[in-house]
Image (tube, rainbow, N blue to C red):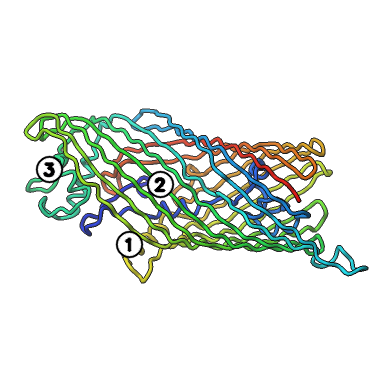
Amino acid sequence: MKRLMLSIVAIAATTGTLYGQSYAPDALKFSQTNFGSSARFKAMGGAQIGVGGDMSSLGGNPAGLGLFTKSEFSLTPEFNSMMGKSTYLNTQVESTKDRLNLNNIGVVFYSPTFRMKGQDAQKGVISTVFGIGYNRNNDFGAEFNYEGRNPKNSIADYFSELANGTGLEPDQLRAGLPQMAYEGFIIGHDADGYFPQTDVNNDQAKNEVRSGSTSELTASGAINISNQVYIGASVGLVNVRYINDSEFVESGYNVTEASDYSLSMRQSQETTGSGYNARLGVIFRPADNFRIGATLQSPSWLFIQDNTTLVVDSRITTGSNPGTYTNQPVNYIFNYRVRTPLKGALGASYVVAGKALISADVDFVDYSSIRFSTDQGSEPETIMEENNIVRNSYKSAVNYRLGAEYKVNSQVSLRGGYGLNGSAIKDDDSGYFDTNFYTGGLGYRVNNYYLDLAYQRMETNTDLSPYEVGPASAPEEPVANIKTIRNNVFLTFGVRF
């Protein structure tokens, strides 16, 4: 299991492709979305399913639109500051990445139901509300740096294992990592097969920069029945963009060449996609100060295009083959379809003395239900392997959110919250890969205008390795343990009309 999480590139040179990476980790990224929300509910830990009456309903529980009593427009930019703390081969390194994004924009149109004179205005369908909005619901932006001296192995061990797995002689190797490593005198060949030419105690470093997001353009509608039952539905167009550029460098002593050496492995991945989903939601108000909500989000059906380029260059300082060895980058393209998991959510909210609001949500997501497919049944072995990886590696997860709001006066509100997204990794019984959210903020309202400010601290752990060495039952590759802290600020501007 750890090997799946650590893998970045795994070669399938026998098929002639650049590499046979697992696409399951990417599908997991695209599935781990949060409900879209305004700064108000960001500050309340995202606990919104049982509240409503906020632009967050466009990306969360569409039934919440039924609680609007006016039309409304809002805009939410965000500032993201990411810090990664990496420990690799007993060496600690920090990295940062800052950026500004649009998190949410939407408009809601309120339409009261026409009533004949004398009809009870509080019974039946009181209003219909329609809205359209954009939500950025998962951010991939990050930068990881790690480095250290490796006393056990070299990436050349990885290259030689890949080359031996092909069963090919050197002049038969196809374009890919084994061929690049052999041509650059990083691995050699004798009667026993391929072997690493490098020694241990080499210096290693890697820089990895990620960007992109998943986002949705959503159209939603809801009705208000007797100010007690609110029913809503939405359809969403999903957009995926994920970019990962990395460089691994290593330097040390080449035993075979009796020379110092250095090498660089550069990878550039661009993954884009689009798809659609739908939501159904309901909110029930058994009492004026108590609401219960539920929403069911369908799987997102995504069409993904993955384009990855990889190249290895090396330099031998002295010996019988001194020089700089550069290779042409090799490109691999794979198009596939992904069905993300169904997501169910329950929520409740309670108003205390007309001054405070307490809200809590819980989500249920089965990540082992992620499924791959392709058009016209192409590459069936790859699809079968990816689906097996998903079934064997991922599990169901439960997400929790808790929030509170206190009205200082008619204009100012204070907010706070906490959230936890459960780990999707089957072997993670300790919750190591959980994501924790700590939030706070305030709001200001005057007449038909409002301004909400939210702060969110998000903490998660990631394990990465630049290559694989040894059998799957006893992996020997070096591991970077990375603690990621994201400090996000959201500012919502809104107007009712």
Disc sitting over residue 243 in the figure: 2
Q: Is residue 442 above or below residue 279?
A: above
Mark 2, mark 1: which one is toward the viewer? 2
Please determine whether, in this image, residue 448 is positioned above or below residue 12: above
Q: Residue furthest bottom?
A: 376
Q: CA distance from mark 2 to mark 1?
A: 22 Å
Going by the numbered disc 2, the residue's amino acid type is: Ile
- Badge count: 3
Residue 76 image point, x, y percent: 62, 44
> For the residue marked with disc 1, what is the amino acid?
Thr
Report the amino acid beneath label 3: Gly
State the mark number for residue 382. 1
The residue tagged with tag 3: helix, strand or loop?
A: strand
Q: Is residue 72 above or below residue 45?
A: below
Q: Earlier in the sequence, mark 3 or mark 1?
A: 3
For the residue carrying disc 1, how many other residues have a C-alpha within 10 Å: few (<14), some (14-19), or many (20+)? some
How far separated are the C-alphas under marks 3 and 1? 30 Å
Element on which disc 1 rests: helix
Q: At which x and y percent is residue 163?
A: 18, 50
Q: Position of residue 93 (x, y in %)?
A: 40, 29
Q: CA distance from mark 2 to mark 3?
A: 34 Å
- From the viewer's perspective, is the residue at label 2 or at label 3 nearer? 2
In the displayed structure, 73 sits above or below 117; it is above
Q: Is residue 385 shown left or right of residue 367?
A: left
Q: Which residue is mark 3?
A: 188
Please give the label number shown on residue 215. none
Q: Is residue 30 left or right of residue 59?
A: left
Other-residue count near label 2 (Cα within 10 Å), few / some / many at <14 / 14–19 / ≥20: some
Secondary element at image label 2:
strand
Give the residue drawn at x 7%, y 48%: 191
